[in-house]
Image (cartoon, rainbow, N blue to C red):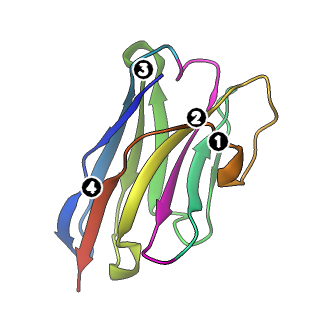
Amino acid sequence: VQLQASGGGLVEAGESLKLSCTASGNIVRGNHMAWHRQLPGQERQLVARITSFGATDYADFVKGRFTISRDNGKNTVYLRTNSLKPEDTAVYYCAARRGYYRPTYDYRDYVYWGQGTQVTVSS
């Protein structure tokens, strides 16, 4: 299983980006998918998740601004990021966890990871 993240870039505060995560195998359907982010020297943190049954959760710092979604037919998970702030600057990673496990907020429970895509927000 390989996850390929894309869509990052350099934007100004208040602008938007749509991140995509495409899987090589049939990992998106029926499994828990999530986006995490990591700042230099800091621990990876969950940004948003969508469970195998379609429930979504968001970190408090992105609620109301980010939206996670999935397209099982395209084996792709998306993260729509609106109203970006400079503090959203980070490397964003997509990850997967098998659906027969319980959903989790802990990044260490996710087994499959993409390579990350850099999001930089200027003030």
C-alpha gap between disc 1 and disc 4: 24 Å
Q: Nearer the viewer, residue 114 or 104?
A: 114
Residue at 49% x, 78% y: name it.
41
C-alpha gap between disc 3 and disc 4: 20 Å
Query: Residue 73's x, y, as percent?
Result: 42, 13
123 vs 33, left or right, is: left
- Reading the image, the residue beneath label 1 is 110
Q: Residue furthest bottom?
A: 123
SS under mark 3: loop
Q: Which mark is residue 96?
A: 2
* CB-based contact (under 8 Å), mark 1 and mark 2: yes
Other-residue count near label 3 (Cα within 10 Å), few / some / many at <14 / 14–19 / ≥20: some
Task: Specify the amino acid type for callout 3.
Answer: Asn
Task: Specify the amino acid type for callout 2.
Answer: Ala
In the image, residue 34 lies in the stretch drawn in magenta? yes
Residue at 38% x, 68% y: name it.
90
Q: Counting residues from the N terminus, which is met first, the one under dot 3 or under dot 1?
A: 3
Query: Residue 31's x, y, as percent?
Result: 64, 25
* CB-based contact (under 8 Å), mark 3 and mark 4: no
Query: Residue 103's x, y, as percent?
Result: 76, 39
C-alpha gap between disc 1 and disc 2: 6 Å
Closest to the camera, between mark 4 and mark 2, is: 2
75 vs 83, left or right, is: right
